[in-house]
Image (cartoon, helix red, strand yellow):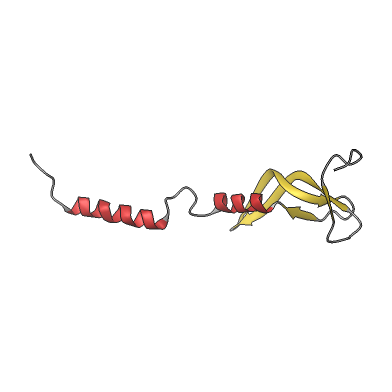
């Protein structure tokens, strides 16, 4: 990185003339029929043609957050837990 260019840039794959710089922009996506907006989302934006390439790791994290199973235990654990709970419910209460 040189003193004249303090921010990392990469050549634009679309126009080949511009330089893509990391910026934080608003990401828009549809989730079913709901529009989801994510402010301050990391992306590479070309200074000439405006092409946007979103940060891959940020997209992966967003996909995990928006997943219908987000916050739920893994399926394997859920099924085992439900089996234990159903066994407990079918057994008569213990008396001492």
Measured from the top left, where is residue 44 in percent x and y? Answer: 78, 50
Identify which residue is drawn at 87% across, 52% down. Answer: 19
How many numbered marks have been drawn onto this rendered protein structure?
Answer: 0
Residue 86 appears at what percent x and percent y? Answer: 24, 54
Q: Decide which of 21, 64 is in the foreground and name it.
A: 21
Front-most of residues 27 and 15: 15
Residue at x 11%, y 44% (from the top left corner): 94
- Which quarter of the image is occupied by the N terminus? top right
Q: Does residue 60 lie above or below 96 as drawn?
A: below
The quadrant in which residue 4 appears is top right
Horizontally, residue 57 falls left or right of residue 48, namely left
**Residue 76 in the figure: left or right of residue 56:** left
Q: Quadrant of residue 2?
A: top right
**Is residue 24 left or right of 93 when viewed as pictured?**
right
- Name the spot of residue 91 as percent of width and height, x first: 15, 52
* Residue at image location 61% in from the left, 50% down from the top: 62
Q: Is residue 26 left or right of residue 75?
A: right
Residue located 60% across and 50% down the image: 61
Residue 77, image x and y in percent?
Answer: 37, 54
Q: Quadrant of the C terminus?
A: top left
């Amino acid at each position: 990185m040189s003193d004249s260019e303090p921010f990392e840039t990469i050549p634009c794959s679309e126009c080949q003339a511009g330089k893509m710089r990391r910026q934080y922009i608003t990401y828009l996506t549809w989730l079913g029929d709901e529009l989801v907006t994510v402010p301050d989302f990391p992306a590479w934006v070309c200074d000439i043609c405006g092409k946007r390439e979103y940060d891959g790791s940020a997209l992966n994290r967003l996909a995990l957050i928006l997943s219908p199973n987000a916050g739920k235990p893994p399926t394997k654990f859920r099924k085992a837990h439900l089996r234990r709970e159903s066994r407990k419910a079918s057994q008569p209460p213990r008396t001492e």
